């Protein structure tokens, strides 16, 4: 079985895959203060709760956009499982042709999501990942990664609103029954959910227009399930896209 770890700025997703199928996935908060030992204890606890013997894990891979935590998490995996994980980065085989100025600037998460989208759904493709930031990147019909756009995520937008306007409270991100609302909470929810959905629809239209042809669209990330159902565009929702991408990349390199 493969231990796949996707570390973002807000959450770390721990996933276990068996023959390409997700056995389980768990999300925990990314904490820069945690040591390698603390993350090892956390991983051990997750495996124990899930009833998984660490000896059954025969491979591990990490995608990280948090450089200060990459080595501690690598050491944590080694401590908890006895396996030194593969780190997604320069020199790793991905099958993706990166056509940007400096390929080293492309985040591991963007590479992993693009590889998964390309291999599973086929290019040309727009890959949307909704986390701390919402990213929308393009893989063209020649399987070339062209880059894309980075947008403030829904939680970032909510925090900015609540911190900047004293009368605007922190709220749950959920879709109200209507777009037009008189109450403050419902009006904020409308802006966050329907506003983000409209933003994605607009970006998809503009990207298709710029490329000169229609592209498939796949979305993933913690907030995708809350926003994508309210988009008017045809979007494939794949909550396990990153884990699938890590599995594909691991197999390419082993």
Image (tube, helix red, strand yellow):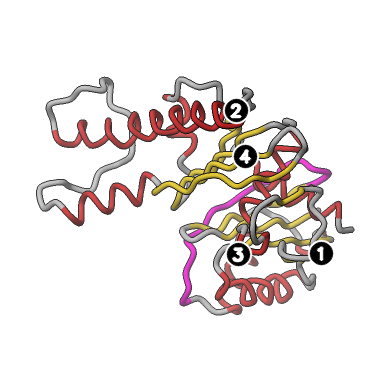
* Eye-nearest disc, 1 or 4: 4
Q: How far across and how far down the image is residue 174, in percent?
A: 33, 34
Magenta segment: 18-33
Q: Nearer the viewer, mark 3 or mark 2?
A: 2
Where residue 15 sits in the image (x, y, percent)?
Answer: 66, 52
Q: Residue furthest right?
A: 254
- Local crowd at mark 1 within 10 Å, few (<14), some, or many (≥20)? few
Residue found 64% across the figure and 41% down from its top: 240
- Residue that numbered label 2 is attached to: 236
Is residue 23 at all visible to an observer of this figure?
Answer: no
Q: Depth check: 129 or 210 in front? A: 210
Q: Residues within 10 Å of mark 3 (few under 14, many from 20)?
A: some
Tell whether position 234 is magenta: no
Task: Kindly indicate the quadrant of the structure image that contains residue 200.
Answer: top left
Residue 177 visible in the displayed image: yes
Q: Which mark is residue 55?
A: 1
Q: Earlier in the sequence, mark 3 or mark 4?
A: 3
Q: Is residue 141 left or right of residue 107?
A: right
User: Closer to the N terminus: mark 1 or mark 4?
Assistant: 1
Q: Please name whichever residue, 175 or 22, is drawn nearer the observer in this view of the structure.
A: 175
Q: Secondary structure at mark 2?
A: strand
Name the residue tied to disc 4. Answer: 138
């Amino acid at each position: 079985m493969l231990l796949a770890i996707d570390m973002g700025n807000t959450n770390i997703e721990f996933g276990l895959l068996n023959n390409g199928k997700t056995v389980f996935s768990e999300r925990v908060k990314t904490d820069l203060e945690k040591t390698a030992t603390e993350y090892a204890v956390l991983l051990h606890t997750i495996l124990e709760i899930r009833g998984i013997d660490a000896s059954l894990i025969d491979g591990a891979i990490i995608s990280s956009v948090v450089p200060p935590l990459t080595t501690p998490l690598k050491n944590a995996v080694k401590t908890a499982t006895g396996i030194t994980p593969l780190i997604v980065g320069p020199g790793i085989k991905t099958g993706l042709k990166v056509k940007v100025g400096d390929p080293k600037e492309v985040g591991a998460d963007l590479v992993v999501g693009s590889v998964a989208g390309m291999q599973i759904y086929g290019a040309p493709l727009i890959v949307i990942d909704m986390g701390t930031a919402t990213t929308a990147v393009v893989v063209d019909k020649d399987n070339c990664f062209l880059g894309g756009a980075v947008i403030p995520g829904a939680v970032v937008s909510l925090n900015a609103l609540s911190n900047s306007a004293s009368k605007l409270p922190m709220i749950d991100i959920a879709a109200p029954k209507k777009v037009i609302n008189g109450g403050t909470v419902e009006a904020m929810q409308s802006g966050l959910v329907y506003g983000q959905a409209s933003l994605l629809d607009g970006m998809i239209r503009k990207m298709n227009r710029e490329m000169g042809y229609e592209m498939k669209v796949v979305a993933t990330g913690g907030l995708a399930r809350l926003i994508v159902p309210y988009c008017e565009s045809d979007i494939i929702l794949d909550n396990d896209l990153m884990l699938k991408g890590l599995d594909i990349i691991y197999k390419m390199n082993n």
